[in-house]
Amino acid sequence: MNLTPDVLGPLIIGMRAAYARGENAMAHARAVLGTAQNTSDATLIAYDLQAGSYTAVVRETRADNLRWCSQLADVLRPLFPAGGSLLEVGVGEATTLSTVSRLLSPAPATVLGFDLSWSRCSVARDWLQEEGIKAEVFVGDLFSIPLADDSVDVVYTSHSLEPNGGRETDALRELLRVARRAVVLCEPIYELGSSEAQARMRQHGYVRGLADTFRGIGAQVKECRLLPYTTNPLNPSGVVIVEKNPTSAVSPALAFRCPLTNTPLVREADVCFSPLTGMAYPILRGIPLLRTQHAVMASKIVTAGIKS
Ligand SMILES: C[S@@+](CC[C@H](N)C(=O)[O-])C[C@H]1O[C@@H](n2cnc3c(N)ncnc32)[C@H](O)[C@@H]1O
């Protein structure tokens, strides 16, 4: 977490209480911190508190999930190479990733998803297992993704950029860095929303200007449009598609990188370790914690392959 302990402690307690009262925990955080936009800490806390709620809804009714994921799979299919790799950024409980992966044909050879929240990753891992989808789930931050440049064929989002208003340029640069062939954003499109939707998005600190931000950093936007099916007309879902030319004929091996230094990590049972820097990232109940905040300077750690 980035906030100082004197702010963070009361914030967590306050957000938990707001959530228990059925209020919007992020709105509580914006009011307490006096910010118009959402901090990463507030986003993490708010979503962690909700862990388990998405899978509960999908268990009740599959129809809306199938409808949502079908339109996303239709967008991804033509961009997806046979035997390719797929990453969902801000995967939540993997209710989108599981269904999208199943709908892609041929199926992705490698499926990855990460989220700020450990609790949601934990729910996601169990859900994917239940759904019979083989995938790697880890904790990470979309502003410093623990993967190599050009290493995942298709990188997509499903309403995960949404709360990161004001940080659009950094977010899109990072997604473009990791993607090998395409980035697909499935996010609310501020510019195509009604004035009522726009006012709501401003109030919630949501992202804006995604297509223009891509253009501003030199990416060619192939499409920017609203999707036919959206769960909330006041948060109108659309897609922004950017294609990339692969920089080499062969994809780099898909392996975790240190998010601080972009150097290779060696994975063991309870740690991902950077031999170059001596930095260790713990693995909590099987889920790698790969945010910069998780780094432990542990140059003397003894691992199976490396003795420091
Ligand atoms: C509205 S939920 C969508 C979850 C999932 N993509 C889906 O389709 O069900 C947004 C998710 O994005 C995650 N998120 C938001 N900002 C993030 C960031 N900076 N890095 C990683 N995950 C983030 C949140 O923790 C949350 O789980």
Image (cartoon, rainbow, N blue to C red):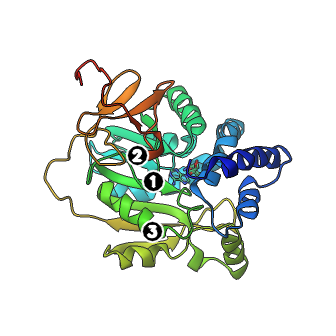
Q: Which residue is mark 2?
A: 104
Residue 47 % position (x, y): 64, 47
Q: Residues within 10 Å of mark 2 (few under 14, many from 20)?
A: some
- Quadrant the C terminus occupies: top left
Judge: label 1 CB < 8 Å from ligand 1: yes
Q: Is residue 142 left or right of residue 2?
A: left
Q: Secondary structure at mark 2?
A: loop
Are discs 3 and 1 less than 8 Å apart at CB?
no
Residue 300 % position (x, y): 30, 26
The residue sitting at the right extreme is 21
Q: Nearer the viewer, residue 35 or 88?
A: 35
The residue sitting at the bottom extreme is 195
Q: Which residue is mark 3?
A: 240
Judge: label 2 CB < 8 Å from ligand 1: no
Q: Is residue 7 left or right of residue 144?
A: right
| Three-letter amino acid code at the position of disc 2 | Leu
| Three-letter amino acid code at the position of disc 1 | Leu
Q: Residues within 10 Å of mark 1 (few under 14, many from 20)?
A: many
Number of marks drawn: 3
Distance from disc 3 to disc 1, alpha carbons, whole Å, reads 17 Å
Q: Is residue 209 left or right of residue 236?
A: left
Q: Which residue is mark 1?
A: 142
Q: Earlier in the sequence, mark 3 or mark 1?
A: 1
| For residue 58, above or below residue 222 | above
